[in-house]
Image (tube, rainbow, N blue to C red):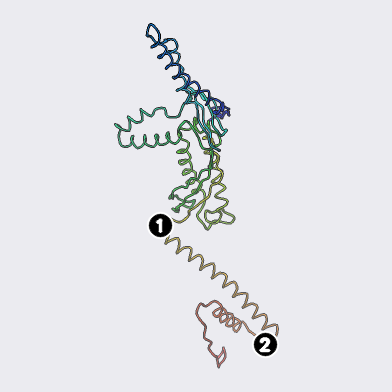
């Protein structure tokens, strides 16, 4: 999508609510007083009729004052309100405090009656979907959007890694809304969008790496958590930028083989560990045998021919590489008798 098609946030300021509050109270009290005065003056007049122009004016001022109450709103620190007037985006208020704006700004509850009727008469799937939408509407009353950091603790997902092994993986994502206009207008429900895209990103990243035992300098899920988390953060940012969301951090919170192959993989890891240990033992034993033969030959303790040398090497390797305790056998003869 071309970036010019995105709705860009426009920060605006509105009037202070503390200025308009006494004005509105004065209009409200004045309209009530004028209405009562028109009635009393009419009773005391010879014709017994109220002062119609004063009564009509009082009623109109009272209605206007009542409507003006809808223009007052408050914002907490790290909170914003998106201003929409008859379907047109007018800007975003980010300054915290008590404010007054156009009372006809949308309150973010449009379509509530239609959704309620669907929830009463629709199918079960429609009722469930509508309930989610109405819950979202109630959370974003008056088009207010929280700019605070939020945590998304993802569920455990079963994914095939690079080698096709099923693994269980989960991640936590720390995110916040950066552009309120994109969050409101470029996606249908930005919180749901974050949930879905986060799951898709975790699945995609997990499929690009092997669980463990990679080749030389190969990044694996278990051995390179920092690199994998950085890759996940980068991909999430690319996906969620369309919704005006900034990803502060993403980290894996759970990583394990799927239960159906966990035992087999455990046995494989144990076998690999045994082989690696054996390789070190044999390597060390060969070095010790070589050192022993060199010392014996250098100090001329004993002269070895090829057969005796082979016998010495065999005995030393058995002693050094055997798992059980070795019991010496005293040879009273020779190798040739």
SS category of the residue bearing label 1:
helix
The quarter of the picture where residue 45 lies is: top left
Q: Which residue is the site of mark 2?
A: 301
**x, y (%) of residue 334?**
57, 91
- For marks 1 and 2, give the CA distance: 60 Å
Quadrant location of the C terminus? Answer: bottom right
The answer to whether the residues at label 1 and label 2 have Cβ atoms under 8 Å apart is: no
SS category of the residue bearing label 2:
loop
Q: Which residue is the site of mark 1?
A: 259
266 or 70, which is in the foreground?
70
175 or 315, which is in the foreground?
175
Which marked residue is nearer to the observer: mark 1 or mark 2? 1
32 or 48, which is in the foreground?
48
At 45% across and 16% down in the image, what residue appears?
A: 34
291 over 163 or under it: above or below: below
At 63% across and 74% down in the image, what residue appears?
A: 287
**x, y (%) of residue 158?**
43, 50
91 over 252 or under it: above or below: above
């Amino acid at each position: 999508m071309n970036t010019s098609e995105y709705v860009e946030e426009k920060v605006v300021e509105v009037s202070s609510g503390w200025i308009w509050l006494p004005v509105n109270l004065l209009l409200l009290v004045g309209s009530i007083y004028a209405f009562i005065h028109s009635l009393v003056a009419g009773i005391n007049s010879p014709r017994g009729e109220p002062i119609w122009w004063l009564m009509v004016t009082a009623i109109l001022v009272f209605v206007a004052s009542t409507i003006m109450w809808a223009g007052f709103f408050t914002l907490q620190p790290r909170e914003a309100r998106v201003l929409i007037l008859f379907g047109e985006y007018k800007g975003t208020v980010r300054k915290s405090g008590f404010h007054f704006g156009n009372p006809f700004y949308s309150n973010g509850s449009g379509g509530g009656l239609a959704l309620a009727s669907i929830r009463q008469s629709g199918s079960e799937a429609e009722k469930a979907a509508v309930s989610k939408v109405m819950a979202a509407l109630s959370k974003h009353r008056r088009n207010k959007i929280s700019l605070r950091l939020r945590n998304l603790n993802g569920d455990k997902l079963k994914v095939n890694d690079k080698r096709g092994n099923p693994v269980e993986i989960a991640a936590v994502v720390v995110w916040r809304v950066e552009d309120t206009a994109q969050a409101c207008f470029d996606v249908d429900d930005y919180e749901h969008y974050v949930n879905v895209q986060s799951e898709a990103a975790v699945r995609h990243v997990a499929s690009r790496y092997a669980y463990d035992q990679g080749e030389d300098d190969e990044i694996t899920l278990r051995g390179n958590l920092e690199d994998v988390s950085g890759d996940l953060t980068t991909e999430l940012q690319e996906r969620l930028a369309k919704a005006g969301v900034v990803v502060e951090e993403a980290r894996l919170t759970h990583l394990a083989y799927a239960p159906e192959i966990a035992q087999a993989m455990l046995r494989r890891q144990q076998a690999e560990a045994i082989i690696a240990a054996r390789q070190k033992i044999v390597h060390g034993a060969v070095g010790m045998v070589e050192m022993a033969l060199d010392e014996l030959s250098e100090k001329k303790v004993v002269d070895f021919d090829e057969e005796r040398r082979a016998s010495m090497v065999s005995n030393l390797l058995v002693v050094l590489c055997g798992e059980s305790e070795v019991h010496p056998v005293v040879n009273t003869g020779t190798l040739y008798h």
